[in-house]
Amino acid sequence: MDAAEFRRRGKEMVDYVADYLENIEKRQVYPDVEPGYLRALIPEEAPEQPETYEDVVKDIERVIMPGITHWHSPYFFAYFPTANSFPAMLADMLSGAIGCIGFSWAASPACTELETVMLDWLGKMLNLPEEFLAGTKGKGGGVIQGTASEATLVALLAARSRMVKRKLANDPERQEADIISKLVAYSSDQAHSSVERAGLIGGVRMKKIPTDSKFCVRGEAFRKILEEDKAAGLIPFYFCATLGTTPSCAFDCITEIGPICNTEGIWMHIDAAYAGSAFICPEFRPLLDGVEFADSFNFNPHKWLLVNFDCSTMWVKNRTDIIAAFKMDPLYLKHDHQESGLVTDYRHWQIPLGRRFRSLKMWFVFRMYGLRGLQDYIRKHVALAKEFEALVRADERFQISADVVLGLVCFRLKGSNDLNEALLKRINSARRIHLVPCQLSGRFVLRFAVCARTTESRHVQEAWAHIAQLATELLRQFPQ
C-alpha cells in the first residue's frame, strides 16, 4: 500500500468507523457466538501471497463483528465505561503514524514534554495538591500508565523499595530477604482483584480490611489490624485505598486512613480508576478530600473522560521514590540531557521500557471539549443513573443495594440470590442490553452502569422497561 492508496483507504475507514458508531445501537449489544467460532471462519495458516485490501475489509463484518461486544452501544450497561471520542481517535491515528517509542526525552522530546504538561493540566482540573504537579521545579509529577492495575503495582513496588531501604539504613546487617518476608500491604475487602494480584507479583502478603455498612474502609478498622500486625513483628508498608469500588462505587475514608499512613510511614496509594474523572466537577471533588495524605494517586481517563484506551494517569508526590525503584541506565539508553534536571525519562516511572505517544489523546480531547464540556459529560451520566435509580425505587418489587453516587446503580429483586441470578440470565440471554453482577453483603446484585457516550434518557427508559417485563415473567413462573 503506497501513500496514494493509504489516503483513499484511510478515508474509507473513517467512513466505516463513523457509520459503525452512528448506527451502533442497531447492532445486538452482546454477541451470539460460541467459543472457537472465529477459527472456523479463517484459514489455518497465513496466506503465502498478498491479499487485496478489499478482501480484508469484507471480512470485518463476516469474521470480526459477529464476535464483538459493543461497549459503545447505548444499551451496554456492564462493567464501567470505556472512553470513546472522535478527537481521541484522530489523535491515536497521529500517534500511530509518528510511531515513536518515548522511553526517554531524547527518544522523542515532544512525547515526553507533552505528557508532563498534560498531567499537570489534568492535575489542576482535579485541584490536586501542588506537590503532585511537576511544574518546572516540583518534586512530584504525573505519568501515563497502561492501566490502573499497572499503577497499583508500580506504587506497591516503589513502596516496597522505599521501606526496604529505610530498614537497611537503620540496620545495615539485616538481610533484605528477611525484611521482604515481613512486609505486609493492605486494601479494602471491596478492592479490585488487581490489587491482590499486585501483592502476588510483588512477592508480599496482602491483607484485606473489612468494610462498614457503606462498603468503605474506616480508620478504626485499619488501625486495629495494623496494630495486630506490628505486634506480630510484621512491617506494614502499603495501603491501597479505593475511591469508587468496582462492585458498588464505594469510597474508602481516606481522611481517616491517610493520617494513620503518614504517621506510620506507610505508602498510601489511591485507586480511583472509574470515579476519578468525576472529580473535575466541583460538586464531586469532596470525594477526593484526603488526597493530600497520599503518596500516589491514579485514575483512568480511558474510562470516563473521553480519552480512548489506554490512558491511565498516575501522580506521585515525590518522583525520586518511584524512580529509585525502577532506574536502570545502560549506556545505549543514556543521552546528553539526562542529568540536566530539566527533562523526564519516563522509562524510570513504569514497568515496560517502551511507551506510545498517549498524551496526544489528552491534548486533543482537553482542547476540543474544554473543562466545561467534560464536566457536562460527567454530569449527564450521573443524571441518567439517578433517573434509573428513581425507576427502580418506584417498583416495589425491587430494591437499591448501595448508595448511588455517580453513574452506577446496584439493584436487585426482593428475594433470593437464585431469583436474581435467574433474572440476570434472562436479561443477558435476550441480548437487548448487557449487565454484569456483583456480590454485596452476601447478596447477588445487578449492576447498571451508564457507559456509552451516546446513552440518552430513552435508552435508560427502554432498558428499565425490558428489565421490568422480564421480572414480571420470571415472578409469574417462580412466585416468591
Image (spheres, rainbow, N blue to C red):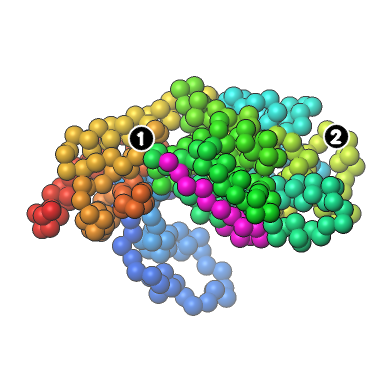
**392 and 104: which one is in front?**
392
Q: In terms of image quadrants, where is residue 462?
A: top left
| Residue 362 higher or lower than 76, as above or below | above
Task: Name the residue that disc number 1 marks.
Answer: 404
Q: In which quarter of the image is the N terminus?
A: bottom right
* Left or right of 81 in this view: 345: right
Q: What residue type is labelled 2?
A: Gly
Residue holding disc 2: 341
In the rendering, at what x and y percent does residue 278 appear? 48, 31
The front one of 348 and 362 is 348
Residue 380 is at least partly visible in this image? yes
Left or right of 304: which side holds 198? Answer: right
Which class describes the residues within 10 Å of circle 1: few (<14), some (14-19), or many (20+)? some
Look at the image and say whether residue 209 sits in the magenta stretch: yes
Residue sitting at x 41%, y 47%? 247
Q: Does the magenta stretch include residue 379?
A: no
User: As shown in the figure, which amino acid type bears the numbered disc 1?
Assistant: Val
| Picture coordinates of residue 406, whole percent (x, y) | 40, 34
**Is residue 313 visible in this depiction of the protein?**
no
How many marks the image carries: the answer is: 2
3D distance between C-alphas at marks 1 and 2: 46 Å
Q: Please indicate whether residue 454 sits to the left or right of residue 395 in the image.
A: right
Q: Mark 1 vs mark 2: give the one in front.
A: 1
Q: Which of marks 1 and 2 is nearer the N terminus?
A: 2
Secondary structure of the residue carrying tag 1 is loop
Residue at (36% x, 48% y) in the render? 440
Callout 2: 10 Å neighbours few (<14), some, many (20+)? few
Q: Residues in magenta?
A: 197-212
